[in-house]
Image (cartoon, grey):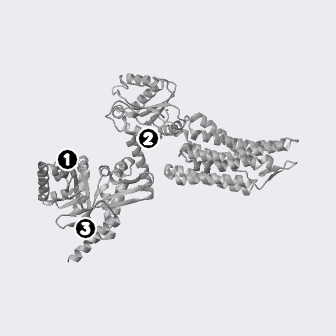
């Protein structure tokens, strides 16, 4: 037995084991699973063709040479298809072919089709291989094209891995890189050392690695309840939405499960969930059940007949009128019905609806897709994706809104914000950016980025020597919930050896109303270092007057709604005037916003107001424009002297 046959037998044995386990454990039908099994079976056929050739040469005395020709022809066709299936398998974990532009499809499909036609033409051209009359095998120059095809598709896999790197976990990236390295090494070895035909065996080993670490069907099963997992749900939905076949989803949430687990224990909770799953599985034959989270399940109902889903919902509601469990019971369920792909054609939009449903525990017990603002959810998805891209590329642009001192008649401070430009969405600005950042988990990273840039800007431009009192940054509510947020901000200031009085942190009334006692203590400690703390949006209605002395505020910023009310209402103007006077008596600096034209400026001119901002003075400026404003004011004051 030669090396080629030994490696081929090993490849067949590995392939049989993979297929057997795939059949046993795989419960998800999708493009990824299809490409994977095609890859394994195709490689096994390649190996069998090598074994067949060895059997003919070893045990048949008189044979037509076209037998060998057929074996080798099957070998080359299936061998090249393997690398194409490998590419499509790995790419299907990122995107479907329907999502790829036509030009990109050409780059993927045309070279493979051309090389396959070239291989299929070999019986006529003998451009790749041929056999002599005595059965001796010879390579032709065209075999280089086949190896080029192998390397081309491996290069495409590497490109996809880099271009879509955010779609791969670090573990998955390392696995794919290892497979690429093995595949390229075996291709080079077989090209230059033809007697070491190791590729089939290496591909079988790579298939086993894919099966265990990426395809891994055990990850698609919930270990406690023996139902499909969240990973299986995601894979299945990608495939199901592409097929455009009608199916319904019912998301079920058990809102009392946490309390039940606390009172009855983990084991009792598991037994209860098994009973729930068994009940759901008896409702119809065309159902797949997925466990998305501890107390969240999804029922996939394939091709339901008219009224079937309503019947299922009615049965679930009827069953949950009776308690589950022993002494501690569960007796409520919330349901969301989605008709796909009629109502939702995109998996991320579907997941957005499901997330909103899970985050709205006080809404109706039965909801449908129509109960949600799909445009807002779509915008959320777009902003979140754009934010991830911006974080990767660090393409944020800082912007500054000058703050005007009435006493000094010049700019003495500024509020810092940021924006970024996305190719698809255009400019995305501060308020919207942070609203979505807190949902995507980027809020602290984004907040630290602004704070770090601001501290560096103050230090590099020596703003304290140019007549500026401070730069102000907003602390958004979700930032305040982060662990060690104040300590982290202090570390950044220390890194730049910054005078703390150059920093002003703005906390909204809403933030103060939700702040914990430990956060308030941290703010107090930071204020003792010299950092100014500003209560902004005062008058928006989230707190009472006591919030002014609950924390060490040095600046009181009046909400612009109060300014606008004071313009037309004498009582509102009196209230505002009293508020400004009170703040001054409490040794607090006062600031008003929304001074957008001369009438507002005239109104506040004689009030006890220290600072003002609005379009009457300046709009938001980019860094260079802001520096020009400061330098211009400094030059003017120098000339006056």
- Residue 588 visible here: no
Of the pair 50 and 472, the residue shown nearer to us: 472
Query: Within the image, what quadrant is residue 551 found in?
Result: bottom left
Q: Residues within 10 Å of mark 1 (few under 14, many from 20)?
A: some
Which image quarter holds the C terminus? bottom left
Give the mark nearer the N terminus: 3 vs 2.
2
Find numbered disc 2 in the image and state the secondary structure of the residue it sits on: helix
Which residue is nearer to you in this view: 314 or 46?
314
- Mark with earlier residue (1, 2): 2
Q: Are marks 1 and 3 in contact (CB under 8 Å)?
A: no
User: Mark 2, residues whose alpha carbon is within 10 Å: few (<14), some, or many (≥20)?
Assistant: some
Alpha carbon separation for disc pair 1 and 2: 36 Å
Q: Which mark is residue 543?
A: 1
Find residue 468 and name its label.
3
Camera-side residue of 540 and 254:
540
Horizontal and vertical percent position of residue 438 = 35, 49
| Residue at numbered disc 2 | 349
The image shows residue 174 at horizontal and vertical percentages of 55, 52
Residue 121 appears in the figure:
yes
């Amino acid at each position: 037995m030669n090396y080629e046959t030994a490696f081929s037998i090993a490849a067949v044995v590995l392939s049989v084991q993979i297929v057997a386990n795939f059949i046993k454990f795989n419960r998800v039908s999708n493009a990824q699973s299809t490409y994977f099994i095609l890859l394994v079976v195709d490689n096994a056929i390649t190996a069998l063709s090598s074994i067949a050739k060895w059997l003919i040469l070893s045990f048949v005395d008189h044979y037509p040479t076209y037998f060998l020709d057929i074996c080798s022809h099957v070998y080359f066709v299936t061998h090249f298809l393997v690398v194409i299936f490998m590419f499509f398998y790995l790419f299907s974990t990122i995107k479907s072919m329907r999502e790829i532009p036509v030009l990109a499809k050409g780059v993927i499909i045309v070279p493979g089709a051309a090389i396959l036609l070239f291989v299929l033409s070999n019986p006529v051209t003998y451009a790749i291989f041929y056999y002599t009359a005595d059965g001796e095998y010879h390579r032709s120059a065209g075999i280089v094209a086949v190896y080029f095809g192998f390397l081309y598709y491996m290069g495409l896999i590497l490109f996809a891995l880099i271009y879509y790197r955010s779609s791969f976990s670090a573990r998955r990236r390392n696995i794919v890189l290892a497979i690429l390295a093995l595949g390229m090494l075996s291709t080079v070895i077989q090209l230059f050392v033809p007697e070491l035909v190791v590729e089939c065996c290496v591909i079988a080993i790579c298939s086993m690695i894919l099966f265990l670490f990426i395809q891994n069907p055990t990850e698609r099963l919930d270990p406690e309840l023996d139902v499909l997992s969240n990973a299986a749900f995601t894979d299945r939905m990608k495939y199901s939405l592409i097929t455009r076949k009608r199916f319904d989803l019912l998301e079920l949430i058990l809102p009392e499960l946490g309390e039940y687990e606390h009172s009855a224990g983990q084991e009792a909770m598991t037994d209860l969930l098994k009973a729930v799953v068994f009940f759901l599985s008896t409702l119809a034959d065309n159902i797949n059940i997925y466990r998305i989270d501890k107390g969240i399940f999804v029922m996939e109902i394939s091709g339901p007949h008219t009224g079937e889903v309503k019947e299922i919902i009615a049965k679930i509601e009827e069953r949950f009128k009776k308690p589950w469990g022993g002494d501690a019971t569960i007796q409520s369920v919330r349901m969301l019905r989605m008709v796909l792909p009629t109502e939702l054609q995109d998996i991320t939009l579907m997941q957005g609806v499901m997330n909103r449903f899970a985050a709205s525990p006080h809404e109706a017990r039965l909801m449908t897709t129509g109960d949600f603002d799909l445009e807002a959810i779509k915008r959320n998805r777009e902003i979140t994706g754009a934010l991830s891209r911006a974080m990767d590329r660090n393409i944020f642009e800082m912007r500054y809104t000058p703050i005007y001192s009435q006493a000094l008649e010049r700019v003495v401070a500024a509020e810092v914000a940021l924006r970024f430009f996305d190719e698809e969405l255009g400019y995305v600005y501060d308020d919207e950016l942070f609203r979505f950042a807190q949902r995507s988990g980027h809020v602290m990273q984004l907040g630290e980025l602004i704070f770090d840039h601001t501290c560096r800007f103050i230090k590099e431009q020596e703003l304290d020597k140019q007549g500026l009192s401070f730069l102000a940054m907003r602390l958004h509510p979700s930032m305040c919930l982060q662990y060690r947020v104040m300590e982290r901000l202090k570390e950044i200031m220390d890194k730049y050896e910054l005078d703390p009085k150059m920093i002003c942190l703005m906390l909204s009334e809403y933030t103060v109303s939700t702040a914990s006692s430990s956060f308030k203590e941290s703010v107090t400690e930071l204020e003792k270092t010299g950092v100014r703390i500003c209560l902004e949006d005062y008058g928006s209605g989230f707190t009472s007057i006591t919030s002014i002395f609950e924390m060490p505020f040095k600046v009181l910023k009046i909400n612009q709604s109060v300014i606008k009310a004071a313009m037309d209402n004498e009582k509102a103007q009196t209230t505002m005037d009293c508020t400004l006077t009170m703040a001054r008596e409490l040794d607090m600096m006062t600031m008003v916003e929304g001074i957008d034209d001369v009438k507002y400026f005239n109104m506040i001119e004689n009030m006890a107001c220290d600072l003002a901002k609005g379009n009457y003075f300046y709009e938001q400026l980019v860094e260079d424009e802001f520096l020009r404003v400061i330098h211009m004011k400094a030059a003017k004051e120098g000339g006056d002297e």
